[in-house]
Structures are given as structure tokens and as C-alpha cells.
């Protein structure tokens, strides 16, 4: 559903941008709002900007919702149609009735708990059906198809029963629906993008946007096909393991006939493709899976990659939808929805399987490879984020605002690392839940899912928060140091230590039945508790000592020291996490009967994967780390209260809250590493008597480094007014009450003015100018333009073909060619409105001043008017020009003006614009001003101001 929704949003956004009747008003409003409220690359969302765009973006969100509904509707049709076609094909085969086989089939269904409406139907088909399979329409009972030869062997339980149990395992897992959904997900991306981009290609032909959308859709379809094939192969192996119960593994193995590794036509490349896209494992792989039931390497890693990739694509799509649906809440609502969507997909896609594996590991004492789903998820998140960031295509361009490969790599790394850390913490939740009573039913199951969801939300919170601030590293530091710790959603992560604490209490109650001594005595004897106590004493002692013996002198020093102490307190917990996870003492609840003879104080050292294995030990170690960090922070806060320093809520947040935030993200980085194979030894690396001195030495070293030289980038000064991105509005931005769209020009008669103006006799400005003086006259125009306008390079006119040919003199300004032999000096300048993120609506002004040896004659203006009269409309470079005229400004000795109405495309995809070209002669000098506007009216007042300023600058120095 999430992937299909993402495909629908991408296709809908592509259609919205291609349909100019929808996208042009939105783009014009977007550019106008950017100019009106001073949006810049540093501050792309100034105050008032989101309110300005509320209505235009709401229409875009409606288009996206319709596209999602259409794609989901098509998927539903495929979900029903594909199995229906399969059933129709089965009707062409001859059917048989074998009563005894049907009775045995019913017995096996009852044994699997498939009765009533859950019981599948049986169909015995003749040739060419040679293999058993399951098919069915969604909402109806599936059909198990057996070849007639297998049905006749119903009296042989070693041949008939394993095959039927295999198919019934597919029925119980609802693999039939999964296969149909996978087909819809593989087939829909490219057609959906094709429909969305059909209008764009039909009007403007193939372009980069459509090509990029097709490329990404193709990559998504290929990725889904590969991952789905791998998951289907994993489901086949799971069905084999389910069918191999009750000592049936040998019988099922005997039925599998290895293909002998026959050669595939086409060479190794085709064989590799066949392996990657195969939906069924080879007989050798199925036999190996039956012989090694705990080997689930391929499925776990592949499942993690698939869930991670779908999570990022869905995050980007949902971000686009939410941002457009309620644009005034752009600063907080999309980020909140992004994180929760990611958490729901990660937990929903992975946690049930993690819980099943943890429960199986506790019951069977097997050693699950927890690193595989963790690494797979991190890899899927990294790859998908990199693609989304580097290809900001319609439907996903708002989440990761990457500018360059470095930013894309950084965002991908952050997303991948934090996602892997979140899944690793979910592993600890699953392991703790599996150790509790009846974890798969009742309130414990809901508590486990809620805890995993809460931890994932907290860990992933920085993912959508960093990209908008990436352009300013100082803002990133401020956000991490001040805004992130103040986020209330991070408090959800406290659910993990609470669950671990509950598990600790339950385990204590179990251990009380086997221990004669008191709990307090056992805790005193526990190495883990001693490690926590030593770490708290050393870490808190160093932090308190800094306050007592080196008090800060300024506010910035006080804040910087507090930030350093917060990092130190978090690192104390990390040291305890690593040390206690590497130790063999699971705490004060271990079974004394299993104590090591050589190390009585070390406690029980269970085998990895059994109760007390790696994940369980990490859970206990994390609880010890939280205790160490919290204990050290409370000691510092108590010292502040006793010393009479500030002890209000802000001090409590800074002293206790910030260290817990440090511990959360440091644990998210460390726990995945500790889940790697052989990363955690079975016993203490050092003798038990050296553990406490080692812990004290490490914590003391960390204290000296953090509080002494310090960690670069940790001490962030208090932000001053104007530091935040919200306060960085452009200096020339008008007030929110300013008009967004300029006033339309007055309706004057479209005629050109030729002849002397009413300005009187030629002034002294008509003298010949030097090159430097023409440059000064051109540069003066800057004072008539808004300060937000940008200077652009002056480029030569293009050589596009002009039709009809009688318009060439007007379009090429050929009437000015007669003046070029007497040219003495020339200067030109070009200015334009700031480049917005869309760049649809724009205004460009180009000014040129040319000084000649002799006075500029009126014949040039007569030739210009003749060229204008000979041309009514022409086409150049795909743009249609309609020639018109408006009164020229009464300036200089003589002035002339020509106007063009521009249009490209047709129908709903039509883009319009306007151009005004003004010539003014003043003695030996000629002023040429051109104003080009796109998707907005031409500003007559600005044009008059520009021409007047340039002509006025031609006076005597």
C-alpha cells in the first residue's frame, strides 16, 4: 500500500506539472510569493510565505490524492483480475476426482487449523500440470491445485503429505494475496508514470523531467521485482520448513530433485538474471534450508532492504502530499507525519518477524543473526535516500533538498545509520518481549509494538529536520544543540528502558525461586551493578569538580560547559553499555547453579542465542547504561540544588534531559555494531578483578578529554536574534500586505510614437560619450530596480530560424545596422528577478547605451517603424510572437517602442509572456531598453522608470 501510494503521488505530481492549466497558476503564485516575502536560498520559507501559497498548493494536493486513488484502484483491479485469469486458464485443463485424496486433504487441513471458510478448496488437474501450486481470488477461498499423479499417491504419506502441507503453509501465510500484490506493484509504476507524463510528452516532446521520472519508475519497478522475488523465495523456504514438521523433512528432501546445475542458455549473465528474478529457490537451496532450519539469511537481509527502500519512498511521497495539503503548517506538520510514517512502516514491516525470531531463539536456544535485518534495513534506507536526494523528481522533491552529491551522501548516511540504529533497538524490544510471559498475546504484544514504535520515532526524528538547514552549518549546530533536545517526541524513547525495567523485575521474581540470598546482596555482588556505580562516581565527580574548581565566567562559557557535561554524561552510559555487554554477568538475577567455577562472581555465561544471549545481554546492558547516565545526571542536578545554583525546569532539562538525548543517539550508533557476529565476547575480556579499574580508567580518560580540550563542535553558543532561519528575511522584502501580482498595464492604444517628443530641444546630454561614461550610464539603472534583482551576463541574440522571412528585420533589429560604422562606445547590462525554485514567472530588463561619432538621425526610427508595419506575427525557436505597439515615453529627441505578445504551447499547456522594446535617441547617443516578462503582466511603471533613469544619466558629468 505504501509503495503504491508513493507511485500514485509521483504520477499525480507529474501530471499536475505537465497540465499547464493547473501548474502555471500555481507556479506564478509561487514565484510571486517568493518575491513578495523575500525568499532566498538561505531562508527559503520566510514568514508569510506559507500563508501566501495555502490555496494554490491545496489544489495540487487534491490532484495527488486523486492520482493515489486511481493507482490503488488499478492495483485492486489487478489483485482480482490476475488470479481470475489464472483460474480461467485452469478451466482448460481436465479435472479429476479422487475421493480418498480429498479425504486425506481434509484431514491435513484440519491438522493445520484450516476449517470452515479458512479451508482451501482442492482441484486435481491433469497434464500438463506437473507441480502443485495454490491460486485464488482475493476475498474467496484459495484453491490448492495438485497434479493427478500426486493425488493418486495419497496412500503414501511421505509423498502426498509434505507437498500438501507445503501448499497449506502458503494458505496460512496468505502468500496468494502477496503474490498478486507483488505483480501489481511491479506492473504499475511505469504505466502510471506514462499516463502522468503523457500530456507533457504530447505537447513538448520528451524532456529531462519525464525521462527522469521514467528512470526512477523503472528503477523502482526493477528493485521491487528483485526484492519481491527474493521475498517469494524466502516464503517458499518458510513453507518448506512449515511442511517439514513432525519428522517430514527427510520425506520432503527426497521429493526435491536437484537440477544438477544445468547450463543456462545465454551464458553467465543470463544465469545471474535468472537467479535474481527467480520466484522459486533451486532444489539445492530448498534442501539446504530443510537441513538447516535456522538459516534464514537471505530472507532477513532482503526483507530489511525492501522495508527500508519502501520506507524512504513513502516518506518522500507523503511529505509532498502533506506539505501541499496544508502549506501554512510546512514548518512542522510534514516533519511529524514523515517520522511517524517511517516508524509505522519500519515497525510494521520488521517487528513481527523480529518478535517471532526472538521467541524461537528463546525456545530452541538457537543463535539468530540479528545483524542481517539491521544491515539490510540500513542499506535499503541509504540507497533509497540517495536516489531520492539525487533525483528530486515530481512527487518526492520536498523531503531531501540536496544540492550536490555531498549533501545527498550525507542525508543518505544519516538516514541509513539512524534507521539501522532504530531497528537494532527494536531487536532489544523483541528480545525483552520474548522473555516475558506470553509475549504474542494480550497486553504484552501491544506494549512491545508501542515501545518499538516510540523508539523508532525518537531515533528517526532528525531525518526530516536536517535537510532544510543544510545550507547553513551554523543553523544545523544550533538545531542539534537546542531544538532537538527540546523536542517532546524524544520522550517516547523512555518506553524502552521502562520495558527493560519491567523485564528486569519479572526476571527477578523468577530468580527469587532459585536464590536463597536477598536481592540486595545479589545486586551488591553483581559485577554489572558495580560497573554502573564506578562509572557514576567517576563521571559525576569530574562534572561536579569542573563546576566547583573552574566555574564559567560568561553565559556562553556556562552554556558550553553544560553542553560538554551533557556529552560526558551520555558517554558514561555508552562506556557502561559496551563494558557490560561484553561481560558474561547478566545481572543480579542469574542462576547460581550455572556460575563459572573459575569466576564465581561473574555469574552465568549462557550460549549465544539462548536465554541470556547477545540481544538479551544488550538489553540488560542498555538498562545499565540508562541507569549510569541517569544516575550521573541526577548527582549533578543534586549538586546544583545544594550549591544554590539554578534548579528550575530549564536546569533539569539541561542537566538530565540532554544527557539522555546523547545516550539515545549514541546507543543507536553502538548497538548495531554490538549485534555484529562475534562483536560481543561470551566472557569478560579481562579478569573480573580488573573490570572495575578498567571502567574507572576509561571514564576518567573520557572525562578529561571532554571537559578539557573538548570535542569539536559540541560547544554551541547561545543563538542571538536573527540567527534562526525564520528571522532571515531578505532586506528588500515588502511587508505581508504588499501586492503579490503587479498592477496590469493601462489599456492604451497599441500604436507606436514616431517623431519629436515633447521634451524640447536636445540637451547637453547629446554629446559623444566615452566607454567609461556609457558604462556609468548603464549602471545607473540599478537604482531604478528593486534591490532583490540580480545581475545577469549579457548574451548575444540567438540564430533561431524566423518565419516568415519578412519579419527578420524586426526580429533581428536590422534597422540599426546602418549605425554600426559610426559606433564610438557601447555598454550594456542585464538584470532579472531572483531565480526562484520554480523559475516559471520572471522579469528581465536589458539596457544598452551606444555613443556614435555623429548624431543619430531620425531615419533609423523610420526604418524601425517600416519593419514593424511589415510584420504582424512570427515564430522563432518554437515561441510565437504577435507584434503590437504602445505609446513610447516622451523622452529625448525621439523615441520609439514595439511590443510583442509571447506564447508557447497550446490549450491548457500554453505559456504566455510579453516583451517591450524602447529606443530613445539623444544627440550622438542611442538608448535601447528591453523588458521581457513570463507568466505575468508587464510592469509599465517599472519600464518607464528604467528608461527615464538611463536617459537622465546621459547629462553632463
Image (tube, helix red, strand yellow):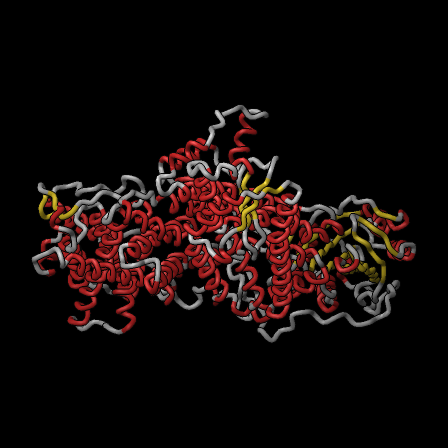
Give me the residue at 12% from left, 42% from top: 687
Q: How many marks?
A: 0
Residue 212 seen in this snapshot? no
Q: Position of residue 898 (x, y in %)?
A: 83, 60
Q: Where is residue 71 in the image (x, y as percent from the top left)?
A: 62, 56
> In the image shown, does 906 or 381 lie closer to the viewer?
381
> In the image shown, does 228 or 22 lie closer to the viewer?
228
Residue 875 shown left or right of residue 648 in the figure: right
From the image, which quarter does the C terminus lie in? Answer: bottom right
Q: Where is residue 153 in the image (x, y as percent from the top left)?
A: 49, 36
Residue 415 shown left or right of residue 797 in the figure: left
> In the image shown, does 506 or 620 lie closer to the viewer?
506
Residue 545 shown left or right of residue 295 in the figure: left
Q: Tell me the quarter of the picture where residue 342 sits.
A: bottom left
From the image, which quarter does the N terminus lie in? Answer: bottom right
Residue 617 seen in this snapshot? yes
Give me the residue at 62% from left, 46% from top: 86
Residue 48 shown left or right of residue 342 in the figure: right
> In the image shown, does 447 or 625 lie closer to the viewer?
447
Q: Position of residue 847 (x, y in %)?
A: 72, 56
Amino acid at each position: 500500500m505504501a509503495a503504491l501510494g508513493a507511485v500514485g503521488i509521483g504520477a499525480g505530481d507529474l501530471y499536475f506539472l505537465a497540465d499547464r492549466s493547473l501548474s502555471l497558476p500555481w507556479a506564478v503564485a509561487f514565484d510571486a510569493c517568493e518575491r513578495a516575502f523575500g525568499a532566498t536560498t538561505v531562508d527559503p520559507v520566510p514568514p508569510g510565505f506559507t500563508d501566501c501559497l495555502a490555496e494554490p498548493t491545496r489544489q495540487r494536493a487534491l490532484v495527488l490524492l486523486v492520482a493515489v486513488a486511481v493507482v490503488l484502484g488499478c492495483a485492486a483491479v489487478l489483485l482480482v483480475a490476475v488470479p481470475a485469469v489464472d483460474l480461467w486458464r485452469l478451466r482448460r485443463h481436465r479435472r479429476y476426482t479422487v475421493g480418498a485424496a480429498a479425504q486425506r486433504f481434509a484431514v491435513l487441513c484440519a491438522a493445520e487449523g484450516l476449517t470452515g471458510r479458512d479451508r482451501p478448496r482442492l482441484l486435481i488437474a491433469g497434464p500438463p500440470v506437473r507441480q502443485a501450486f495454490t491460486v485464488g481470488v482475493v476475498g474467496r477461498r484459495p484453491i490448492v491445485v495438485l497434479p493427478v499423479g500426486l493425488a493418486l499417491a495419497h496412500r503414501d504419506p511421505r509423498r502426498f503429505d509434505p507437498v500438501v502441507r507445503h501448499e497449506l503453509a502458503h494458505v496460512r501465510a496468505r502468500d496468494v494475496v502477496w503474490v498478486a500484490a507483488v505483480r501489481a506493484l511491479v506492473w504499475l509504476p511505469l504505466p502510471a508514470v506514462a499516463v502522468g507524463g503523457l500530456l507533457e510528452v504530447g505537447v513538448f516532446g520528451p524532456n529531462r523531467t519525464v525521462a527522469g521520472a521514467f528512470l526512477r519508475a523503472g528503477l523502482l519497478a526493477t528493485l521491487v521485482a528483485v526484492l519481491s522475488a527474493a521475498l517469494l523465495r524466502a516464503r517458499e523456504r518458510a513453507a518448506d520448513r512449515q511442511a517439514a514438521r513432525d519428522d517430514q523433512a527427510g520425506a520432503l528432501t527426497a521429493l526435491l530433485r536437484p537440477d544438477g546445475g544445468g547450463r543456462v542458455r545465454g551464458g553467465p549473465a543470463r544465469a545471474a538474471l535468472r537467479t535474481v528474478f527467480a520466484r522459486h529457490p533451486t532444489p539445492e537451496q530448498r534442501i539446504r534450508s530443510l537441513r538447516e532450519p535456522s538459516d534464514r539469511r537471505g530472507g532477513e537481509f532482503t526483507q530489511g532492504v525492501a522495508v527500508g527502500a519502501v520506507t524512504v519512498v513513502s516518506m518522500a511521497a507523503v511529505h509532498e502530499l502533506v506539505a501541499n495539503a496544508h502549506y501554512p503548517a510546512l514548518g512542522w506538520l510534514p516533519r511529524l507525519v514523515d517520522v511517524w510514517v517511517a516508524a509505522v512502516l519500519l515497525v510494521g514491516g520488521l517487528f513481527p518477524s523480529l518478535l517471532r525470531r526472538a521467541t524461537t531463539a528463546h525456545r530452541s536456544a538457537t543463535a539468530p543473526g540479528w545483524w542481517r535485518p539491521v544491515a539490510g534495513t540500513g542499506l535499503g534506507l541509504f540507497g533509497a535516500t540517495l536516489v531520492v536526494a539525487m533525483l528530486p523528481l515530481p512527487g518526492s522533491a520536498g523531503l531531501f533538498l540536496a544540492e550536490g552529491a555531498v549533501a545527498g551522501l550525507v542525508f543518505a548516511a544519516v538516514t541509513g545509520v539512524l534507521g539501522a540504529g532504530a531497528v537494532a533497538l527494536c531487536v532489544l524490544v523483541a528480545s525483552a518481549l520474548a522473555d516475558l510471559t506470553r509475549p504474542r498475546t494480550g497486553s504484552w504484544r501491544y506494549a512491545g509494538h508501542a515501545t518499538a514504535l516510540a523508539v523508532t520515532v525518537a531515533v528517526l526524528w532528525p531525518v526530516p529536520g536536517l535537510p532544510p538547514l543544510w545550507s547553513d552549518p551554523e543553523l544545523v549546530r544550533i538545531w542539534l544543540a537546542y531544538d532537538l533536545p527540546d523536542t517532546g517526541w524524544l520522550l517516547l524513547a523512555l518506553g524502552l528502558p521502562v520495558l527493560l525495567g519491567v523485564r528486569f523485575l519479572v526476571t527477578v521474581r523468577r530468580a527469587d525461586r532459585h536464590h536463597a540470598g536477598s536481592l540486595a546482596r545479589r545486586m551488591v555482588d553483581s559485577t554489572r551493578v558495580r560497573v554502573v556505580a564506578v562509572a557514576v562516581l567517576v563521571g559525576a565527580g569530574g562534572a561536579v569538580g569542573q563546576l566547583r574548581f573552574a566555574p564559567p565566567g560568561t553565559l556562553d562559557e556556562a552554556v558550553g560547559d553544560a553542553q560538554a557535561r551533557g556529552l560526558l554524561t551520555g558517554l558514561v552510559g555508552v562506556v557502561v553499555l559496551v563494558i557490560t555487554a561484553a561481560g558474561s554477568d547478566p545481572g543480579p538475577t542469574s542462576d547460581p547453579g550455572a556460575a563459572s567455577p573459575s569466576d564465581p562472581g561473574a555469574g552465568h555465561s549462557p550460549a549465544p542465542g539462548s536465554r541470556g544471549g547477545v540481544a538479551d545481554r544488550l538489553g540488560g546492558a542498555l538498562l545499565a547504561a540508562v541507569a549510569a547516565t541517569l544516575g550521573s545526571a541526577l548527582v549533578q542536578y543534586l549538586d546544583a540544588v545544594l550549591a544554590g545554583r539554578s534548579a528550575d525546569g530549564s536546569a533539569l532539562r539541561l542537566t538530565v534531559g540532554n544527557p539522555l538525548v546523547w545516550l539515545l543517539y549514541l546507543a543507536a550508533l553502538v548497538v548495531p555494531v554490538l549485534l555484529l557476529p562475534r562483536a560481543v565476547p561470551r566472557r569478560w575480556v579481562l579478569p573480573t578483578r580488573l573490570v572495575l579499574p578498567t571502567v574507572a580508567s576509561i571514564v576518567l580518560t573520557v572525562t578529561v578529554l571532554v571537559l578539557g580540550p573538548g570535542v569539536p563542535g559540541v560547544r554551541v553558543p547561545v543563538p542571538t536574534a536573527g540567527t534562526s532561519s525564520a528571522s532571515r528575511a531578505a532586506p528588500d522584502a515588502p511587508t505581508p500586505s504588499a501586492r503579490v501580482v503587479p498592477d496590469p498595464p493601462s489599456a492604451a492604444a497599441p500604436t507606436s510614437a514616431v517623431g519629436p517628443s515633447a521634451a524640447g530641444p536636445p540637451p547637453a546630454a547629446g554629446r559623444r560619450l566615452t566607454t567609461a561614461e556609457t558604462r556609468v550610464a548603464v549602471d545607473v539603472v540599478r537604482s531604478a530596480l528593486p534591490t532583490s534583482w540580480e545581475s545577469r551576463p549579457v548574451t548575444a541574440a540567438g540564430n533561431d530560424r524566423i518565419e516568415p522571412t519578412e519579419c527578420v528585420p524586426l526580429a533581428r533589429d536590422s534597422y540599426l545596422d546602418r549605425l554600426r560604422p559610426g559606433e564610438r562606445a557601447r555598454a550594456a547590462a542585464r538584470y532579472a528577478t531572483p531565480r526562484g525554485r520554480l523559475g516559471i514567472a520572471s522579469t528581465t530588463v536589458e539596457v544598452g547605451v551606444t555613443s556614435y561619432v555623429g548624431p543619430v538621425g531620425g531615419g533609423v526610427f523610420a526604418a524601425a517603424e517600416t519593419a514593424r508595419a511589415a510584420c504582424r506575427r512570427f515564430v522563432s525557436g518554437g515561441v510565437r510572437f504577435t507584434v503590437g505597439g504602445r505609446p513610447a515615453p516622451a523622452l529625448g529627441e525621439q523615441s520609439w517602442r514595439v511590443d510583442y505578445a509571447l506564447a508557447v504551447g497550446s490549450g491548457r499547456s500554453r505559456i504566455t509572456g510579453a516583451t517591450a522594446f524602447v529606443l530613445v535617441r539623444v544627440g550622438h547617443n542611442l538608448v535601447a531598453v528591453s523588458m521581457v516578462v513570463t507568466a505575468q503582466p508587464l510592469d509599465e511603471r517599472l519600464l518607464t522608470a528604467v528608461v527615464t533613469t538611463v536617459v537622465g544619466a546621459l547629462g553632463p558629468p
